[in-house]
Amino acid sequence: MSERDDDKPQEGRPTGDQPTPDAPDESKADGTAVTDAEAEAAAKAEAEAKAKAAAAKAKALAEAEAAKEPWERDPVAPAWVEAEGEALTEALKGSCGEGIVAARTFAGELVLDVALQAVQEVGRSLKKEHGFTLLVDICGAHYPDREEAPFEVVYHLYNLEQARRIRLKVATQEGTEVPSVVAIWKGANWPEREIYDMYGVRFSEHPDMTRILMWEGFNGYPLRKDFPVEGVDTGAAIYPEFYGDEAGPVAGTGTGWKPPKPPEEESTPEEA
């Protein structure tokens, strides 16, 4: 019988009678072998380098942590702090008087409670005299448990030169209009319309106090806390269990602005 191919020793693969060759010794670039002392010294140097890198990283992290504000290092929410004596607050009190109802800071950011009729005066002062030229946003809020003024309008302002943010808060009630700040910051136009659309808070002197997200005739204000979570029917339908006969906007409210109709094309004699 001929010997099977599987039983033949393959070239380069050791068989049972052939010892496995030892791994080649490490050598230097010049071909000489590395001694045990040199290998130990190299391992020690590598360990020291890793230890130095770890220490440098830990030091950098510690320095970054130390540079943080106290409220950033502590995950617990910071407390409100009265801002009496704060420079900007005192300057506004000097120019706007009782228009500044209260001043507090939260996480280092100044928050001013402003009287309803003083919002334009305070806004002009902040923009022209104190550099708050950027109106970042205007937000609405609804606190149904507050009887006197359950709605708030919150203005987020930014001073580009000082990289500083402040907030103005104006409280109002159902049916009381808030003076518009569109004449001060043109970017207030759409945010004020959105607040009216979502909360029903109207702004006096606004150039177009109409809805911007919901369609004209939608019943109710979706971001109010008492708005039904299951929603309401579309259109101007009235739900007596939730709203009175006069609640909710109806078609024809607002300024009545509509997009202009395209000009009618004159027909030619041939088309006639």
Image (spheres, rainbow, N blue to C red):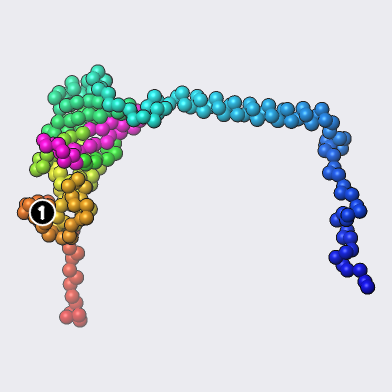
Query: Between residues 121 and 144, which one lies in front from this camera angle?
Result: 144
Which quadrant of the figure contains the C terminus?
Answer: bottom left
| Residue at screen point 13% across, 24% down | 98
Image spot of residue 269 (x, y percent): 17, 79
SS label for mark 1: loop
Residue 198 lies in the magenta stretch: no
- Which residue in the structure is indicated by mark 1? 241
> Is residue 197 depicted above or below 137 in this figure?
below
- The amino acid at mark 1 is Glu
| Residue at screen point 39% across, 30% down | 75
Image spot of residue 81 (x, y percent): 27, 23
| Residue at screen point 12% across, 52% down | 242
Specify whether residue 50 is in view: yes
Which quadrant of the figure contains the N terminus?
Answer: bottom right
User: Magenta segment, which residues?
Assistant: 142-168
Hey, which quadrant is residue 95 in on the image? top left
